[in-house]
Amino acid sequence: MSQAVRFEDKVVIVTGAGGGLGRAHALLFAKHGARVVVNDLGGSTHGEGANASAADKVVAEIREAGGTAVASHDSVTDGEKIVQAALDSFGRIDVVVNNAGILRDKTFHKMEDADWDLVYKVHVEGAYKVTRAAWPHLREQNYGRVIFTASTSGIYGNFGQSNYGMAKLGLYGLTRTLAIEGRKNNILVNAIAPTGGTRMTEGLIPPQVFEQLKPELVSPLVVYLGSEQCQDTSGLFEVGGGWMGKVRWERSLGAGFDPRAGFSPEDVAAHWQQIVDFDNAAHPKDNMEALREMMANLQKYVV
Ligand SMILES: NC(=O)c1ccc[n+]([C@@H]2O[C@H](COP(=O)([O-])OP(=O)(O)OC[C@H]3O[C@@H](n4cnc5c(N)ncnc54)[C@H](O)[C@@H]3O)[C@@H](O)[C@H]2O)c1
């Protein structure tokens, strides 16, 4: 039988929790006993404006259901204020769910600096600021869970989303290194690439499918990743519509050349099929494992 996932002594920050996926995460954390900081700036999907009512409504929903929550109306780019709200209200912070996000979709040839910068600011700098402010507290108490929100648009690319894809896969790069740095202090760090029917995807997903992709179907994974039971770190999970799975890097066995004798672009061309062949592929988990084939090639040719 599975163990109950509970958060009675835990404080959780969910950014961008005034609607969509973040709201669903916040409600589920609260249902499982967490005290929740519901952060939301309350602007448009394009990152314009602000409105305190978004976060306030979700706090009211949580309280009506018997849970404990406070609102934070700051932008994630002022991350230290959001963490301070958790400390002021609840005296601690255990889990950070970096979820706030916007879209400024444009093909790359029409991309303007403002679209590139704003998407970077909200997704990357915002997640950095909130997590950076929480980090000393997580280290101090030797416990923490951090979840970043990536996207399949970053993993696989998506037309018109060069700025968004850059930001979303950047967050996975951040996940990998924070997982390494956090491990000794029991701070586990994972990323999700969700799909959900929210205002962000309205009009992009066919209406019947949109209805079925309920945001609530993403949250059980997020709450599990935020729990003590979860011992995984450095993971990337695709999730939506009641399905979830883990993503990993795969690298071909590759081709080795004699580094002393030298080799030409023509040699690369002649071995191309071998270079891109995924039979007997490797799945390196860290830098050391990744470098193994390269080092083996050097040794092979050392006399
Ligand atoms: N819905 C999907 O299918 C999907 C797919 C991939 C990734 N995502 C990511 O999931 C996250 C949630 O998106 P959603 O679909 O629920 O969209 P949403 O627009 O409903 O929710 C995003 C929330 O973030 C808030 N926000 C925006 N900028 C903020 C800021 N500077 N500070 C604080 N709050 C801010 C918004 O007010 C909004 O409530 C985003 O990071 C998004 O990029 C969503």
Image: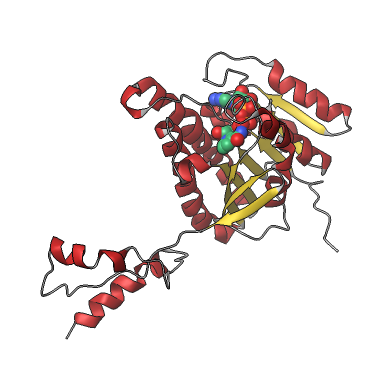
- In the orientation shown, which residue stands out farthest toward the left? 261
Which quarter of the rendered image does ligand 1 occupy?
Answer: top right
Front residue of 5 and 296: 296
Taking the image as shown, residue 116 lies to the left or right of residue 196, namely: left
Say if 301 sits above or below 95 in the image: below
Say if 214 sits above or below 272 in the image: above
Quadrant that contains the N terminus = bottom right
Q: Where in the figure is residue 183, as x and y percent of width and height?
A: 56, 59
Instruction: Using the rendered view, name the quadrant where residue 280 is placed.
Output: bottom left
Front residue of 65 and 80: 65
Q: Where in the figure is residue 39, as x and y percent of width and height?
A: 66, 28
Q: Residue at x 64, y 49 (%)?
A: 145
- In the orientation shown, which residue stands out farthest toward the bottom? 303
Instruction: Using the rendered view, name the quadrant where residue 202 is placed.
Output: top right
Q: Residue at x 82, y 61 (%)?
A: 2
Q: Where in the figure is residue 8, as x and y percent of width and height?
A: 82, 46
Taking the image as shown, residue 102 lies to the left or right of residue 12, namely: left
Instruction: Using the rendered view, name the quadrant where residue 274 is placed.
Output: bottom left
Taking the image as shown, residue 251 lies to the left or right of residue 100, namely: left
> So how many labels did they put on this image?
0
